[in-house]
Each structure stands twice: as C-alpha cells, then as structure tokens.
Amino acid sequence: MAAKPLIGLNADYRSSRKDSPAFSYVCAGYYDALVKVGAVPIIIPPMTDKEDLDRILDLLEGVVLVGGADLDPRRDGFMLHPSVRPLDPRREDFDRTLVSRIAFRRMPVFGIGTGMQLLNVSQGGNLFLHIPEDSPKAIPHQDSMDPAHRHALEVTPGSLMERVYGEGEIRVNSMHHMAVDDVAPGFAVTARCPDGIIEAIESVMDDWFAFGTQFHPEATSASALDLRIFEEFVVGVTGAVCEVRMVA
C-alpha cells in the first residue's frame, strides 16, 4: 500500500494581548478534510528561518494555503482600504515567504480564500480591495448575519472545478469582501460567480499543479460535494510526486 501523502498547512497567528499569550491555530476543517481524503496533514508554524522552512518542505508532497484575514495591499503597492483587516504581520511575512518557496520548487499547492489571493498576487496578479466599491454591480459576497451565505458558481469546461462539480446548478459558500482582479500569468479562471467575480483559478503551466478557490470547501457551511476538491488535490499531488520520481 502506498504511503499517504504528507500535506502542509500554514497556521494562522495572533500576537500576544494583555489577557493572553501569542498563539498559532488552524481551523479543524482543513486538516479534517485532508484526513478524510487520505492525506496526513502537517501544520507549519510561522517560521523565520528559510533553511528550516526548506527542510520541512523537503518532507512534504504538497501544501494547502489556508484562509484568514486580509492581505495588506500596501505590500503590493496599493493603498490601505478602510475595509481591510490585515493578517498579523508575522503570519503574512511567513506566508509570503512560504508561497515564494512553493513557487520556486513548483510544489503542488491549493490556496483557499486568502490563500488563493496570496497565490495570485505572489505570481503577478492583483486584487479587488472591496467588492462593493470595485465591482458595484456584484451580488453580496459576505453576510455578517449569515455565515452560511451562498451564491451560484459557473465553472469552466475541462477544468478541475468541472471534474469536481460536473454540470448543473452549483452553489458555494461566500464570506469575502476582497477578490482576484487581474489573474497572474500562468493561471486561468476556472470558476466565477454569475456577477463575474472570480471564485477559482488554476495553473495552466505544465510543470506546476496549483489552484485556488475563493470559497471554503473545508468550512461547516460547505456541501458534501465540496470535499471532492480535496480529493482532486491529493490525486494531483500523488501524480506530481510520481512524475518527479520518474524524472529523478
């Protein structure tokens, strides 16, 4: 029996406060989903030493970039919008280093929510900072009163998203105010909301299995079908590892 693939998960981070110390954490949905599809999740804390990070990546077959708060647009040359609630600087510092090492290695990666946005900006794309202002005709993509808020999804034929969802009406959870605007070179849009907002991207490069979803297939508001996205990732990781071994 083949060994289960080791899949890394970056951890969220909260700085110390008067009433509590600093700590890292990961929503259980991420690692529970990986376990269900036959992978072994490995949580990666926000490290500062790049050599130590590379030692960990040497052990992994792929990485899932988790969601969280907002990327700080000032790091990419844009002004800070009042609606932006940035990630803790320690997490964002690490996440940007992590995705640069993943890209350099052409390591399989699946970005979710903020993770997809980071994958896009790290490779030369950019973001809408606040959908209601940047795309005024868009439907609501966030409802603070309804954590299970959902909208329709239109998938691109021949994409990983189509393999997951097939044809017919699809609805996914939606909990974001930022979104991908210009897609990074080497990536293509594979799902949109009917209002045009990008909900999934996928690498079109032959040497890199990489994709992302703006919606959250790991969340309690996800459907049973959403778990298939993690299955597709693990299948793709296994195939990518086999190709590397054959080349070596």
Image: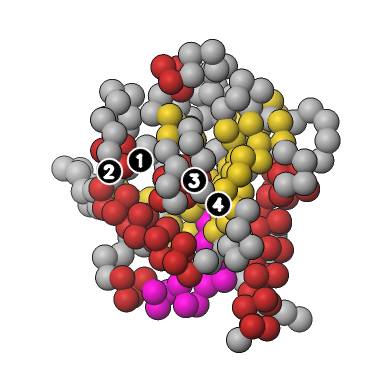
Residue assigned mark 3: 184
Work out whether residue 105 or residue 185 is closer to the camera in this orientation and state it.
185
> Is any part of residue 60 visible from this angle?
yes
Give the left or right position of residue 20, taking residue 170 as reference.
left
Q: Amino acid at mark 1?
A: Leu
Which comes before the other along the chain, label 2 or label 4? 2
Q: Which mark is residue 71?
A: 1
> How many residues crowd around disc 1 within 10 Å: few (fewer than 14), some, or many (20 or more)?
many
Q: Secondary structure at mark 3?
A: loop
CB-based contact (under 8 Å), mark 2 and mark 1: yes
Residue 32, image x and y in percent?
60, 55
Q: Is label 2 or label 1 in front?
A: 2
Q: Which mark is residue 91?
A: none
Residue 65, image x and y in percent?
48, 53
Whole-Å distance between the Cαs marked 3 and 4? Answer: 6 Å
Which comes before the other along the chain, label 3 or label 1? 1
Q: Secondary structure at mark 1?
A: loop
> How many residues crowd around disc 4 within 10 Å: few (fewer than 14), some, or many (20 or more)?
some
Residue assigned mark 4: 186
> How many residues crowd around disc 3 within 10 Å: few (fewer than 14), some, or many (20 or more)?
some
